Image (cartoon, grey):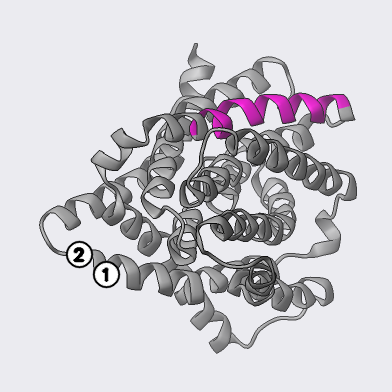
Amino acid sequence: MDLYLQSLAFTANTVAPIFFIVFLGIVLKRIGVIDAAFVGTASKLVFTLTLPALVFMAISSTDFYSVFNPDQLIYFVGATLVSFIAIWWLAARWIQDGRDLGAFIQGAFRGNYGVIGLAVSYNLFADSGLAQASILLAMVIPLYNTLSIIALTVPLQKDGGLKFSDAVLEILKNPLILSVLAALPFSFMGWTLPEVVDKTGRYFANLTLPLALLAIGGSLSLKSLRDRSAMAFWATATKLVILPIILSIGAWIYGFRGQELAMLFILFGCPTAAASFVMAKGSGANGELAANIILTTTLGSVLSLSAGIYLLRVWGII
């Protein structure tokens, strides 16, 4: 029991500050400090500038070769693609509105690995965990963003949204994809940025999380949460319970053990990424549903991640 309580407290300390900032966004919206215009502007700023800066700084400062694990990356890509297709196929059978479908698919598969995953990995495995998580992040970011753009744009074709050719163009010019491509040579070659550029980039990167979370809080609607409770519930159950269990068992069968297996569990068990709200809102999908899924998965991850970490410790995996 003590071990479980320690795991619960550890995960809560990681996740709770995120929830508090979201709650602050709700309060500020209620008292009129921020409004819909702020939410729209903040979302655009995060998507086009601060989040790409965060991605670039994280990847460019990572030694690619020291933490590269091809088997782990191959399993992650394969498992993500299979789960993405399965979620889409099942969700499309009962969600008719393309705006809702795109937000649901993204919320059900896309984890907040860049924030929660890195923090949990570092607290569990110190520098080795952070290094391995960082190189995973270099694959997570382009794959998640590419699949998210597909999920958010393709369903809108039925509702007069983007054509498939436009969706491909959106992928190619996505700021997050461009930031990954720009950062990879620095990671491969060991290049460093001039000090003034490095500091400026980190200033922008540090704006990302609080600004995105305030925008999420400002966009939350209790009425929307009630109206779409079934979609939010199933997206949350898929993200926090179904995918982590199935994909972690698959990783064990594949042959992963110890830290590698724990890292994959953390990767698949993270709550929905805050960036999913920014992308949903920017693409014309249901931003309110995306924000509600972020809220419910963030709260639920306190229990699900701590339970998973507890079991990994009890079974001697970590």
Front-most of 278 and 153?
153
Rendering quarter of residue 63: bottom right
Residue under pointer 1 = 38
In this image, 39 relative to 67: left or right?
Answer: left
Query: In the drawing, does residue 250 fall left or right of residue 300?
Result: right
The vertical placement of 169 against 87, above or below, is below
- The amino acid pointed to by label 2 is Ile
Residue ID at (57%, 41%) = 120
Secondary structure category for the residue under label 2: loop
Indicate the quadrant where residue 124 lies: top right
105 horizontally vs 281: left or right: right
| In the foreground, 5 or 211 | 211
Q: Residue 305 in the image: x percent, y percent?
A: 54, 30
Which residue appears farthest toward the left when viewing the image? 31
Taking the magenta stretch, the answer to whether it contains residue 176 is no
> What residue is shown at x 61% (from left), y 46% (from top)?
122
| Tag 2 residue | 34
How many numbered callouts? 2
Residue 231: x and y, percent? 45, 34
**From mark 1 to mark 2, how far is it between C-alphas?**
6 Å
Q: Which mark is residue 313?
A: none
Vertical side of 169 occupied by 12: above or below: above
Mark yes or no: residue 282 visible.
yes
**How far across and how far down the image is residue 281, in percent?**
43, 61
Q: Residue at x 78, y 37 (%)?
A: 260
Magenta-highlighted residues: 236-253
Mark 2 surroundings: few (<14), some (14-19) or many (≥20) residues within 10 A = some
> Which corner quadrant holds the C terminus?
top right
Q: Are marks 1 and 2 in contact (CB under 8 Å)?
A: yes
Query: Furthest residue to the top?
Result: 1
Mark 1 burial class by Cα count in 10 Å: few <14, some 14-19, many 20+: some
Q: Amino acid at mark 1?
A: Phe
